[in-house]
Image: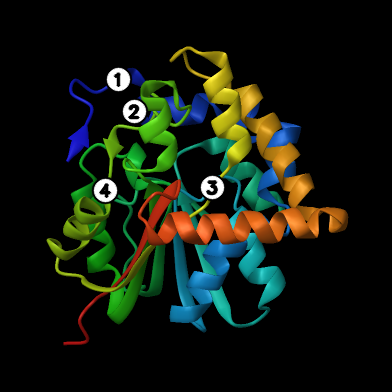
């Protein structure tokens, strides 16, 4: 397991609250996050294992995943989010979403239990991620499902770029392989249902190769690229290129070289 020690200041909850308005609420970030293509992979995976029920999105930010669940599958889910960035939560509330301003570790859910809990690009930010997975186990229904997606330490981008890769950054205090992600979940009592890889962004690879430094990419630049690639995905004239990218992504995922890893794990029914 690769992790940061000592922990950087960017791992503190206050850091994410401070990022709220300049980053999470920037026009580029919101445009990318709430685009219809933003969570298409996660939604396919989610629907495969959870057709309905109570859902908790941990680290929900501005609520984009919850918004997609409500918009695409009205009535199927009762989604809620939990987040420490107050500005991001305000935006989620403005969209009519149920969100909780607290940490998963300290919030009292009372008798409420969830059919699914998601950690989309969250576990890499958390000091002591095992405690969060254990807490998720406590508030899951028997037979409930945990979904986790994290950057892949063994991705093609990491192998080619090393520390120049923009997602090797101070906010990420854990770096997972397929084995360590699965181990994190099973050691807390969950049973692995499915694992895999996803995402590949050649524009990130090219930009980080050209810049030739391991200095952090400014948040504004990361958000701008998210918006640009989102618009390209939505362009109908780029369908042949999107098909080629999909085939490339699938090949990299099969080889364990995609940008991200994901795992689906279930709480035993008894």
Residue 221 percent location from the top left of the image? 65, 23
Residue 168 appears in view: yes
Quadrant holding the N terminus: top left
Asked if disc 2 and disc 1 are in contact, CB closer than 8 Å, the reply is yes
Q: CA distance from mark 4 to mark 2?
A: 20 Å
The residue that appears at 54% across and 45% down in the rendered structure is 61
Nearer the N terminus, badge 4 or badge 2?
2
Q: Of the numbered discs in the image, which one, if any, rests on residue 96? A: none
Front label number (4 vs 2) = 4
Instruction: Indicate whether 168 appears above or below 129.
Output: above
Dot placed on the residue nearer the N-terminal end, 3 or 1: 1
Residue 195 percent coordinates (x, y): 33, 66
Please name the residue that numbered disc 4 is placed on. Answer: 177
Above/below status of 5 relative to 51? above
Q: Residues within 10 Å of mark 2 (few under 14, many from 20)?
A: some
Q: Which residue is mark 3?
A: 200
Q: Earlier in the sequence, mark 3 or mark 4?
A: 4
Q: Are marks 4 and 2 in contact (CB under 8 Å)?
A: no
Query: Vertical placement of 190 versus 49: above or below?
Result: above
Q: Is residue 84 above or below residue 130?
A: above
From the image, tell me which residue sits under label 1. 8
Residues under numbered marks 2 and 3 in contact, where contact means CB atoms less than 8 Å apart = no
- Where, quadrant-wise, is the C terminus in this rendering? bottom left
Residue position for label 2: 11
For mark 1, give the secondary structure.
loop
Decide which of tag 2 and tag 3 comes sooner along the chain.
2
Which residue corresponds to the image point at 24% horizontal and 76% vertical from the top-left? 267
Residue drawn where x is 68% and y is 78% of the image:
74
Q: Quadrant of residue 244?
A: bottom right
Secondary structure beneath label 4:
loop
């Amino acid at each position: 397991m690769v992790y940061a020690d000592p922990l950087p200041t960017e791992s503190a909850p206050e850091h994410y609250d401070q990022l709220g308005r300049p980053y999470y609420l920037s026009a580029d970030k919101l445009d990318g996050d709430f685009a219809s293509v933003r969570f298409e992979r996660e939604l396919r995976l989610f629907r495969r294992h959870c057709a309905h029920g109570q859902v908790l999105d941990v680290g929900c930010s501005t609520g984009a995943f919850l918004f997609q669940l409500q918009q695409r599958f009205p009535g199927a889910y009762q989604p809620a989010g939990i987040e420490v960035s107050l500005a991001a939560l305000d935006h989620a509330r403005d969209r009519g979403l149920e969100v909780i301003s607290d940490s998963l570790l300290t919030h009292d859910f009372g008798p409420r239990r969830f059919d699914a809990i998601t950690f989309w690009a969250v576990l890499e930010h958390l000091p002591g991620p095992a405690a969060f997975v254990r807490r998720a186990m406590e508030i899951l229904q028997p037979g409930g499902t945990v979904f986790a997606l994290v950057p892949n330490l063994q991705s093609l981008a990491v192998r080619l770029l090393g520390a120049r890769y923009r997602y090797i950054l101070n906010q990420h205090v854990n770096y997972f392989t397929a084995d360590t992600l699965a181990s994190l979940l099973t050691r807390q009592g969950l049973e692995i249902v499915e694992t895999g890889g996803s995402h590949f962004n050649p524009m990130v690879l090219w930009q980080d190769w050209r810049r030739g430094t391991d200095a952090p990419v400014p948040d504004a630049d990361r958000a701008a690229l998210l918006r640009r690639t989102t618009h390209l995905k939505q362009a109908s004239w780029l369908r042949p290129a999107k098909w080629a990218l999909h085939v490339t992504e699938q090949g990299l995922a099969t080889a364990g070289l995609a940008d991200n890893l994901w795992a689906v794990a279930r709480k035993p029914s008894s």
